[in-house]
Amino acid sequence: MTPAVLLMGPTGSGKSALALALAERFPVEIVSVDSAQVYRGMDIGTAKPDAPTRQRIPHHLIDILDPTEAYSAARFRADAIAAIARVRARGAIPLLVGGTMLYFKALREGLSLLPPADLTVRARLDARAAVEGWPALHAELARVDPITASRLERTDAQRIQRALEVHAISGRPLSELQGARDTSDALGPTLPVALIPEDRAVLHRVIEERFDAMLEDGLVDEVRTLRARYALSPEMPSMRCVGYRQAWSFLEGLVSEDEFRAKAIAATRQLAKRQFTWLRATPATAFSPAAADLVESVTALLAREGLRPRSTQPDPRRPFASA
């Protein structure tokens, strides 16, 4: 079975450019691993590949939802495994590219066997917290699930509520269930590759320049158009994405233009920091994106793993149907 190549890295590390270079050398189809690129109309702030690129190289899991909808790691895993199977059936190489590390983790390790949310239980816990306070519910959690309670602040309402909800529904502590994972869907073999920038200062400059380019390309107008077209709120997952959340505050008059820019760049740097943390715990063959021979080195790795390059150069005019 053809390995699925997992191309991971922090935002701004050059994943997309490397993926496109590999697509010129190998018969790949790209599967996006990006929790923001799933949304229609969110193009500039997500650095979504443009239409000519997507006509030339097959892309999947892009523009599959309206921004009013939610998307989960569980749904991504199911969608990605289905897309990978279709790519393999066509004799192509699945190339998964993105920076949503939770999605990569769900794909590789499966999903925790946790019960789904129960609105009735949550409402009951919210009502209790309004009277007793979240520290009191944290004390209750310490009695039924001391391991989880020890990891949480006494005021961490969201996580305390979820841990108590899981215990109320299943009768088992969250810390016990988190270790059990559903890996029933066959992912097949994978080849994980990570782009790890060696100089954080350089990455920070790239992030700043990249965001300024997004502003120049019309990010604020994009968010303004989305607000006019859809019944959005700042609590929706789409509008909590980095860049969009800060643009929303700017359009609401809550921050100045300079504050909007500074907050968005700072949030992007924090995102990159979290991605680095995930990558440190993720087994993968690492490359420096600054290496002059990056494309050749990754090409050689894929060839060593038995992935065969194209026999002829692709026709850039070749249309395809994206899924």
Image (spheres, rainbow, N blue to C red):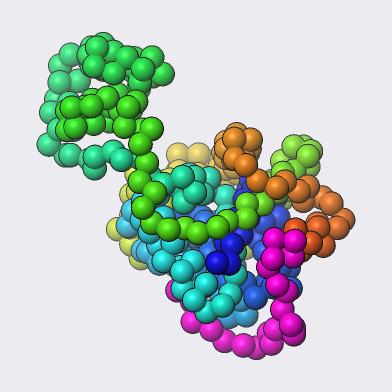
Where, quadrant-wise, is the N terminus in this rendering? Answer: bottom right
Q: How many marks?
A: 0
Q: Viewed as shown, does residue 317 lie left or right of 117?
A: right
- Give coordinates of residue 296: x percent, y percent: 82, 62
Q: Position of residue 77 (x, y in %)?
A: 41, 55
Residue in view at x 38 percent, y 32 percent? 179
Task: Find residue 293 and report its image quarter.
Answer: bottom right
Q: Position of residue 307 (x, y in %)?
A: 68, 68
Closest to the observer, 297 or 100: 297
Q: Is residue 238 visible?
A: yes
Q: Is residue 227 left or right of residue 160?
A: right
Residue 39 among those drawn in magenta: no
- Image point 57% across, 50% down: which residue? 99
Q: Which residues are magenta?
A: 303-323
In this view, 146 is above or below 289: above
Q: Is residue 144 left or right of residue 243?
A: left
Task: Give the quadrant of the C terminus.
Answer: bottom left
- Find out whether residue 319 is within the magenta segment: yes
Q: Residue at x 52, y 72 (%)?
A: 88
Q: Residue furthest right?
A: 292
- The spot of residue 17 in percent (x, y) is 71, 62
Q: Nearer the viewer, residue 249 or 166?
A: 166
